[in-house]
Image (cartoon, rainbow, N blue to C red):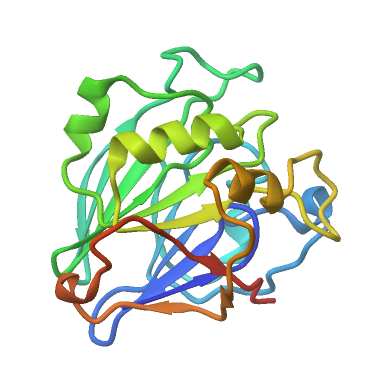
Amino acid sequence: MEITWYGLSCFRMNERGMAAVVTDPYDPEVVGLDPGKLRADVVTISCEKPEHNYRRAVPGSAFEINGPGEYEVGGVFITGVLINGSKKKSSDGSLNTVYLINYDGLNIAHLGELNSVPSQTEVEGLGEVHVALVPIGGNTSLNAAKAAEVISLLEPSIVIPMHYGMSGIDLQLDSLSKFLKEMGLTEVETEESIKITSTNTLPEETRVMVLDLNL
């Protein structure tokens, strides 16, 4: 399967013969970036903020998931779990749903706008996580230090940072470099997309992989 990044918390995941999933499409007028029209069979919404819930970015009749539950669409199994970390609503009153997206045994955890470190029980409830999509930009989501702590709890094979500041974004978020420093990395090669053929090809040690912005 292939994972492509469109900025902030918006990814597209697809595998031949299975449903394509887009996560957290955002409002271009709020964010300052424009992902264009995204093709998908399923769209997941982690929280009701314009940086995460711009449904119009995914035209057509995509199946929408916007909260907890278990779903199966086009061979993809998706589990939504309500986790804010702090067990409280964020400052604007919204709740955060973490999604476990399973492509043929490969578990991808999209943490949405997780704002603090979840409990050990909550982490164990997610089960095995092969790929973690982790917010790192602070403000209303995890900062670099908290993101590193969450990663140590999840122990994924691959970490893909998301929801951070960069040129062109109209949001006050920390940059990628702060997170890389927290993880003890000086620099990381970026990839246009990440392709994973099976769980057998995953690295044994947790690896941070940074995706290029695909606009």
Which residue is pictured at 74% across the width and 41% down the height?
A: 174
- Rendered position, 56 above or below 155: below
Q: Is residue 67 visible?
A: no
Instruction: Name the residue nearer the viewer: 64 or 51.
Output: 51
Question: x, y percentage for residue 152?
Answer: 35, 37
Which residue is pictured at 75% across the width and 40% down the height?
A: 173
Exactly how many numbered labels are in the figure?
0
- Rendered position, 201 above or below 142: below
- Rendered position, 90 above or below 170: above
Instruction: Name the residue nearer the viewer: 99 or 36.
Output: 99
Q: Is residue 151 visible?
A: yes
Q: In which quadrant of the rendered view does residue 70 lie?
A: top left
Q: Quadrant of the C terminus?
A: bottom right
Classify residue 138 as left or right of residue 195.
Answer: right
Classify residue 104 as left or right of residue 174.
Answer: left
Question: x, y percentage for residue 120?
Answer: 25, 22
Q: In which quadrant of the rendered view does residue 15 lie?
A: bottom left
